[in-house]
Image: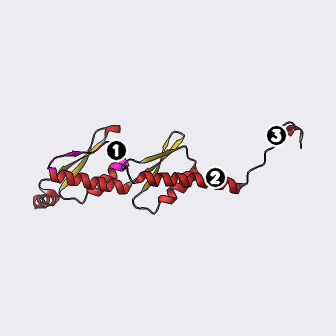
Amino acid sequence: MNNNDRGRKRYPRRSRDSQRSDRDSKIDRMIEKIKREMYTTIDPICLKNLNAFERKIIHRHFDNNPNVSTRTYRDGEEFELRVYPVGNLKKFAQEKAQQAIESGEKVVLPPMSSYERFIIHDTLKDHNDIKSASFGEGQDRHIEIEPDIFGRGLKKIIKKIRLF
């Protein structure tokens, strides 16, 4: 014992294996929580205060799942991991497109992030019966879906005719 250690209580050091198992159980609990929340929402699940290792483990866990996408965003020194329910967003877009077709009126979606809007537009790009566009600024940017009266096919034909 050296002079600096006198009078201090000595605690047994935890082994690396026990630290790793604690960390793994924390990540496993987070992953299970994310999976439970994914079934009911179209909003991303935001996880803050994770270190790089924890973010990487969560990214890897959801890598091969086409219904989930993970993205890390940086704000200054802080990192935020967002887990997007892509499958739910696609289903939501299909339902709203069908609603627009059936009602014949424009359907306004709630404000979304740029990535969520990208998923919606990408999902609806092959629908000839509707058109979708983003409107608004900043946090209020949203998508409006409206039925396309003549469809995209007729517009393509008109463009070809104008070329001749």
Neighbour class for label 1 at 10 Å: few (<14), some, many (≥20)? many
> Which badge, 3 or 2, is on the more N-terminal residue?
3
Residue plotted at (58% across, 51% down): 26
Looking at the rendered structure, the kind of residue marked 1 is: Met
Residue plotted at (39% across, 59% down): 67
Tell me if residue 110 is in the magenta stretch: yes
**Magenta stretch bounds:** 103-116
How much space separates mark 1 and mark 3, taking CA atoms?
Answer: 54 Å
Instruction: List the residue tagged with mark 3.
Output: 9
Quadrant in which the N terminus is drawn: top right
> Which badge, 1 or 3, is on the more N-terminal residue?
3
The part of the image, by quadrant, that contains residue 128 is: bottom left
Looking at the rendered structure, the kind of residue marked 2 is: Asp
Looking at the rendered structure, the kind of residue marked 3 is: Lys
> Which badge, 2 or 1, is on the more N-terminal residue?
2
Residue plotted at (67% across, 52% down): 19
How much space separates mark 3 and mark 2, taking CA atoms?
Answer: 24 Å
Instruction: List the residue tagged with mark 1.
Output: 112
Up/down of 125 relative to 108, above or below: below
Tell me if residue 96 is in the magenta stretch: no
Say which mark, if any, is on residue 22: 2
Tell me whether circle 2 and circle 1 mark residues in contact (CB < 8 Å). Answer: no
Provide residue 106's location: percent of width, then percent of height.
18, 46
Instruction: Report the side of 40 relative to 156 (left or right).
Output: right
For mark 3, give the secondary structure. loop
